[in-house]
Amino acid sequence: MKASLYEGNQTFTVVEKEIEAPAAGEVRIKVAYCGVCGTDVHIYHGMMDKRVSIPVTIGHEMSGTVDAVGEGVEGFRVGEKITVRPLDNRGETPADKGHSHIAKALKFIGIDSPGAMQQYWNVPAFTLHKLKEETDLKLAALIEPLSVACHDVRMSKLKKGEVAVVLGGGPIGLLVAMVAKSKGARVIISEVNDARIKMAEDMGFEVVNPVITDLVAYVDQQTEGGLADVVFEVAGVQASLDVMTEVAGIRGRIVMVAIHGEKKPVDLFKFFWKELELIGARVYEKEDYEESIQLITENKYNFDK
């Protein structure tokens, strides 16, 4: 089989490997599609060389079919469509308080262990989610990032009729906006990139370019002074941190979706003054994956764009 190997120094090579039999408790997957996550890009640029074991096959946004099952595995048959929730929580302890998706010893499959950028991939059976026969496997490669968005929106406690402002209209920002819209919220996206603005508008979203239009003034006018009930910070830049507390209304909820690798200033006075709530949201849980699978299978929200 063919496999992609990250060898450091912004170098990937395609190599020939033997197809390995799945170990006990594992399933071998015939990979159909594998997406490229922002984390994969960080790996390519050498930003995670201290974490990954070079050379390594990466990738975790995927879909495929069951090719073989290892000893002791039940409930899966060859040919079934599946996807992988790439969280290895076998190091979970009572100190993690039942939150296995953010366990201290969590291993992320495709980063901390071999990933899906290969034709056949052996993974623990407990990471698999079954797909329906009618599920489009190409679209199913979006299930993992869409699950991130489902988790973000669920953590926000967003309700029908509320106003959600999404700061950043990249891939994850758009997915967050789509899930928020599916909950019946009014969604306003803040984005500066022309190509991303066009894509969001083509998908029917209300978009503001904060370089041209004052975002806070716009949302204030649109909500008769109420501002946003929920703000999703997805851009990961200082400008978004500055505006998130301004555009949030009284007792607004701010969800931190972006990964900020460095300490950055935040206006804590606004949290005090408006009784704001800051919510961390990291990866996903089983119920988020199941919601994502349903959304992808139904495909009501133009995921194929």
Image (cartoon, rainbow, N blue to C red):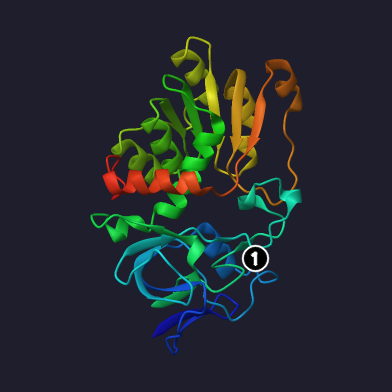
Q: Position of residue 117 (x, y in %)?
A: 44, 73
Task: Residue at 38%, 46% (x, y): give it.
Answer: 195
**Residue 162 seen in render:** yes
Compared to residue 234, the image places residue 254 above or below, namely above
Task: Residue at 47%, 38% (x, y): give it.
Answer: 191
Task: Residue at 49%, 29% (x, y): give it.
Answer: 165
User: In the rendered view, does 38 fall on the left or right side of 99?
Assistant: left
What is the tally of numbered marks visible in this picture?
1
Between 208 and 124, which is closer to the camera in this rendering?
124
Where residue 230 sits, quadrant-wise, is: top right
Where residue 46 sits, quadrant-wise, is: bottom right
Between 84 and 264, which is closer to the camera in this rendering?
84
Q: Identify which amino acid the numbered label 1 is placed on.
A: Met
Between 89 and 36, which is closer to the camera in this rendering?
89
Q: What residue does disc 1 label?
A: 47
Between 165 and 103, which is closer to the camera in this rendering?
103
Compared to residue 292, the image places residue 24 above or below, namely below
Q: Position of residue 173 (x, y in %)?
A: 47, 42
Compared to residue 79, the image places residue 87 above or below, namely above
Q: Residue furthest left?
A: 134
Q: Position of residue 228 (x, y in %)?
A: 53, 21
Local SS, label 1: loop
User: In the rendered view, does 264 fall on the left or right side of 196?
Assistant: right
